[in-house]
Image (cartoon, rainbow, N blue to C red):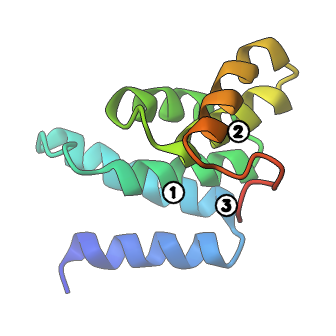
Amino acid sequence: MSNLTLRYEIARAAYEGRDYTEAARALEEILVDLAGEDILHGTSDLRLLLARAYFHSAQLGRAERVLEGLVVDEPADPYVRLLLARTLQRQSRHAEAKPHASLAQALGADTSSTVRA
């Protein structure tokens, strides 16, 4: 198992243990290291987990920034759109959230449910 894989598994375990702040910290460090090696291509799953950790730890501005990057890379991902909509809604930015929620629903996301843990 590589060092990167081990670090990801530790971050994932923190997330699954609902220690979202620790998970976010660990994932941030992984992304910083990958950026230094110019290997951000293919990190959508890792960045989505980071956005989810930020969301659940109420770091909504950070979640929003990560999700905006994911929307650029994965514009047709219904869950990314839904999570961005929920992030904006939690910041009382309902007008900005509405197009993302509508698109998420059009892409097949269940917008009546809550964001998955």
Q: Which image quarter is the N terminus in?
A: bottom left
- Which residue is labeled 3 in the image? 20
x then y, percent, for residue 48: 48, 50
**CA–CA distance in space, label 2 to label 3:** 10 Å
Residue for badge 2? 59
In the picture as drawn, the residue positioned furthest to the top comes out as: 95
Crowd class of label 1 (few under 14; some 14 to 19; many from 20; radius 10 Å): many
- Taking the image as shown, residue 88 lies to the left or right of residue 63, namely right
Query: Which one is earlier in the sequence, the residue at label 2 or at label 1?
Result: 1
The disc label shown at residue 49, or none: 1
Give residue 53's quadrant in the image.
bottom right
Which one is in front in this view, the residue at disc 2 or the one at disc 1?
1
Residue 52 vertical placement versus 40 (above, below) = below
The quarter in which the C terminus is drawn is bottom right
Q: Residue at x 17, y 40 (%)?
A: 36
Q: Quadrant of residue 62?
A: top right
Disc 2 residue type (three-letter): Gln
Which residue type carries mark 3? Tyr
The amino acid at mark 1 is: Leu
Residue 100 in percent (x, y) is at: 64, 27
Earlier-in-chain disc, 2 versus 3: 3
